[in-house]
Image (tube, rainbow, N blue to C red):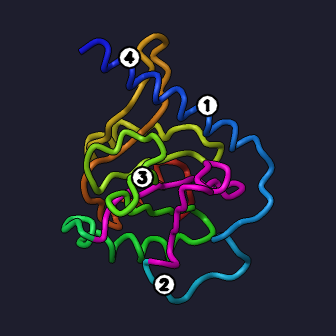
């Protein structure tokens, strides 16, 4: 049991090191964030993640907090959540960065995140640090807060299960985003 926990901690640390490396690397192109606001949306265009391009730097648009949603086109709850996710994406475009990965189709897209079930969402402030929910939000939405055992440092905030559009708004307002 202790060996499994140590392996999980090492995997999280390695993932964080890789994420920090990509955060610091200068972005040369942006696949989704553009000058114009989208008016129509298909799930393929909305928030793609490709394993070969997976980096926090790519997903952290300058000055925008991030939600990574991991799910599957074959997952009932994921499909139920999809309309709210798409609406939130359109309504918050330019203020929030939203990304989606179908990790059943391509498990490598989980990028080392502890995605034990889908849907699962991970939240980051604009600087790449993990979201720290207020007591008020914690009382209304259940989060998994991951910390390093040795230092207690908070390294990841995730939510397992469906989120409504209203809950997404609540989370990002709690982050200080004017929505």
Mark 3 vs mark 4, CA separation in Å: 31 Å
At horizontal 26% and vertical 41% (from top left) the residue drawn is 139
Mark 1 vs mark 2, CA separation in Å: 33 Å
Q: Counting residues from the N terminus, which is met first, the one under dot 3 or under dot 4?
A: 4
Q: Residues within 10 Å of mark 4 (few under 14, many from 20)?
A: few
Which residue is under mark 4? 6
Residue 97's place in the image compared with 120, above or below, is: below
Look at the image and tell me in which quarter the N terminus lies.
top left
Q: Nearer the viewer, residue 97 or 70?
A: 70
Task: Name the mark on residue 82.
Answer: none
Which residue is under mark 1? 17
Single out the residue that lies furthest toward the bottom: 40
Q: Nearer the viewer, residue 18 or 86?
A: 18
**Where's residue 24, x and y in %?**
75, 40
Task: Name the mark on residue 41.
Answer: 2
Query: Does residue 112 belong to the magenta stretch?
Result: no
| Left or right of residue 46, residue 31 in this image | right
């Amino acid at each position: 049991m202790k060996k499994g926990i140590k392996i999980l901690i090492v995997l999280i640390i390695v993932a964080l090191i890789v994420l920090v490396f990509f955060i610091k690397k200068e972005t040369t192109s942006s696949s989704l964030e553009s000058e114009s606001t989208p008016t129509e949306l298909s799930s393929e265009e909305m928030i793609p993640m490709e394993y070969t391009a997976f980096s926090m730097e790519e997903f952290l648009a300058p000055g925008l907090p991030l939600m990574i949603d991991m799910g599957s086109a074959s997952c009932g709850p994921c499909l139920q959540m999809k309309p709210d996710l798409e609406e939130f994406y359109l309504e918050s475009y330019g203020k929030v960065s939203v990304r989606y990965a179908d990790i059943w189709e391509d498990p490598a897209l989980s990028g080392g995140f502890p995605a034990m079930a889908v849907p699962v969402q991970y939240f980051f402030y604009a600087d790449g640090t993990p979201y720290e929910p207020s007591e008020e939000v914690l009382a209304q939405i259940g989060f998994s807060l991951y910390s390093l055992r040795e230092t207690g440092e908070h390294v990841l905030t995730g939510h397992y299960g469906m989120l409504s559009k209203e809950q997404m708004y609540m989370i990002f307002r709690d982050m200080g985003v004017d929505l």
